[in-house]
Amino acid sequence: MNITVDEMEKMTGAMSSAELASERHSRTTVGDFTAADPRMTCRNVDVWYGSKQAINGVSLDIGKNEVVSMIGPSGCGKSTFLRCLNRMNDTIDGCRVTGSIQLDGQEIYDKSLDPVPLRAQVGMVFQKPNPFPKSIYENVAYGPRIHGLTNSKAELDELVESSLEKAGLWKEVKDRLDQPGTGLSGGQQQRLCIARTIAVSPEVILMDEPCSALDPIATAIIEELIDELRANYSIAIVTHSMQQAARVSQRTAYFHLGDLIEVGETNQIFTNPQHRLTEDYITGRFG
Amino acid sequence: MSKPTLNAPQAPVRRTIDIVNASLKRRHAQERRFRRIGAIAVALGLAFVVLLFADIVGKGYTAFQQTYLQLPIELSAEKIDPAGTREPETLSTADYMAPIRAALRQQFPEVTERRELRQLYSMVSVGAPQFLREQVMENPDLIGTTQEVWVLADDDIDMLVKGQIDRHAPEESRRVNDRMLGWVEHLEEQGRIEKRFNTIFFTQGTSREPELAGIAGALMGSFYTLLLTLILSFPIGVGAALYLEEFAPKNRWTDLIEVNVNNLAAVPSIVFGLLGLAVFIGFFGAPRSTPLVAALVMTLMTLPTIIIASRVALKSVPPSIREAALGVGASPLQTQFHHVLPLALPGMLTGAIIGMARALGETAPLLMIGMIAFIVDIPSGFTDAATVLPVQIFLWADSPERGFVERTSAAIIVLLAFLFLMNLVAVLLRRRFERRW
């Protein structure tokens, strides 16, 4: 196969492959992975990059109007898992997903399902702010335009305004909508990306370390925004900051080497972790 | 930490810095040497470029002027239009050489012997009557009057006036004999010889006579060839690059295709000419010596260049842009056309123009498909027999007449000017379309 042992080790965060093999198929998730009112349900999800397994039998629900955070050391598969939820992994050669992932009861890896409308329903915000090299207006208007969500220019204007408003950016950019989105500061760019995601009114928003490239003030603004967005959307967020997970999420999932070790109420995970690995990670002894 | 360990690192630090200082001089010397070698290389390269340009321009600039003789020409009505109808057909078939010769005899009445007369007549170009005819056809009122007309001089006279033939050289080693030199000097004294801007060079096709030869035919041939090459190769090249880079699965077949595309870019151009001869002319029966076949061959030749440049341009577009577009639900094709292509376009255009510049300067494959034919007419379409600039240069460089030497250089100047222009356009397009993200 096309992935070498070196690459494998890079992916798994410098764990030796022998250690990896010995730990495979040995873990069951501690805690309740279901949500009371699930929007997305994942059952026994395996992800393979070529011959290497990156995710090992993960089951997790994402409930309505809740923020689920995923934490864990580098290379534990949390980002990989997140990218499965809107089939972003399709773009990676040799990536294979098995198991069941459902959005509102619909199997998203079904052969007949088109990933294009799926990604309109499950939006994504990336680690590095990635606005299009176009104007601020065009950035937000792009999604609605390709999906034909609005019928007139006035409607589109309104949608752009409300999306920017929801992302907390409207006041800062309303006078310069025709200027390039890439000219904004890092935090503003990330909020622009959130506005762009909201503009197509998704049901679930996936955030892949949205604050890792931002300073504390910008981070605080985004965190506040996430809390507000919870009222209308389901949010899954991957983060490296345990404080951030504790601040924004209702439930927290701890990943370790492709396994989902523990899921639970955020409070409980951070105050009373059940699994030794979770405790080690949270107390900073490992990771 | 305890106190001894705090002081302990002091000693090794000093030692390290000593070693660093000791090697510093050598390292700086290395750097200076490298810089000097680089500067010398650049200077040397520039010197050769300047030398080349100076040589070509020095030899070629005189071709932009052409010598004319002023003669009082009697356009008698009986000779040109005896019936007096002024019909275009009569006017165009009339003998215009006779009045020019009469005017020459009138200038030098002492010349009567046949051999001398023939030399006298050879002072004007064989194409001179044609230009006189055009003047008369344009303005028939000239008939019946005597006009001071500037008549195109023969290439030997042209060379003599421009100083390319040494007047002080012994007669036997000079193409123009003493008698003719005397006539030229006589005309010069009377102010009847003048160098004028050489419009013939830019408006006429090639000719056996240097003074009548122009590059218009070759320029049009090059224009049609390049236009069709661009129309064919750019969309195909960009499409192929887009498919290979963004859509095709990465497997053994695409690897094979990639290796072959890279190899094709290095195939000697004459091989493409052979292929064109065998396939386009031999198998498909396309008309030979035409811009159509030339463009097909050039397309095959430039496609690898364009594909490689386009793939590099596509690779340089950050993947985050693709993810962003896919993330809001754009289809893969929309992602490519709305976001990736606009960002990759400057690189693609640069590649295309570099490919076009190479096609403009290409000679060898065109020889194989018959573009080397001697074609006087200016082509007016893709299926007219034509030649192209570099082939024209090749043909003229092969001609023995002194007049073709300066015309060869002049044609090279024109070719270089076009290449320079194309590269300038490539740079400007790059600047214009370049966006930051």
Image: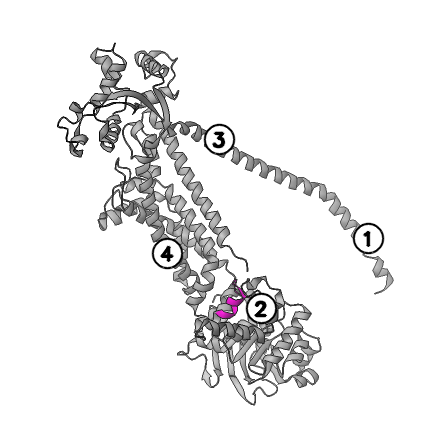
Residue A133 within the magenta-colored segment of the rendering: yes
Task: Tell me the tag on residue B11.
Answer: 1
Question: Which residue bears the numbered disc 4?
Answer: B235
Q: If the image is split into quadrants, where does the N terminus of chain B sit?
A: bottom right
Frontmost of labels 1 and 2 is 2
Q: Is residue B367 above or below residue A279?
A: above
Q: Is residue B185 left or right of residue A269?
A: left
Residue B365 appearing in the image: no
Picture quadrant of residue B256: bottom left
- Label 1 resides on the chain identified as B
State the CA–CA distance, disc 3 to disc 4: 39 Å
- Label 2 resides on the chain identified as A
Marks 3 and 4 belong to one chain? yes
Dot 4: element:
helix
Q: Considering only order in the chain, which callout, 4 or 3, is on the residue closer to the N terminus?
A: 3
Mark 1 closeness class: few <14, some 14–19, many ≥20 residues within 10 Å = few
- Label 3 resides on the chain identified as B
Frontmost of labels 2 and 3 is 2
- Where are the magenta residues, as a range? A128-141
Query: What's the residue type where badge 4 is placed?
Result: Pro
* Residue at image coords 55%, 62%: A179
Q: Is residue B399 above or below residue A80?
A: above
Task: Provide residue A76's location: percent of width, then percent of height.
Answer: 59, 74
Picture quadrant of residue A170: bottom right
Question: Which residue bears the numbered disc 2?
Answer: A174
Question: Which residue bears the numbered disc 3?
Answer: B51
State the CA–CA distance, disc 3 to disc 1: 60 Å
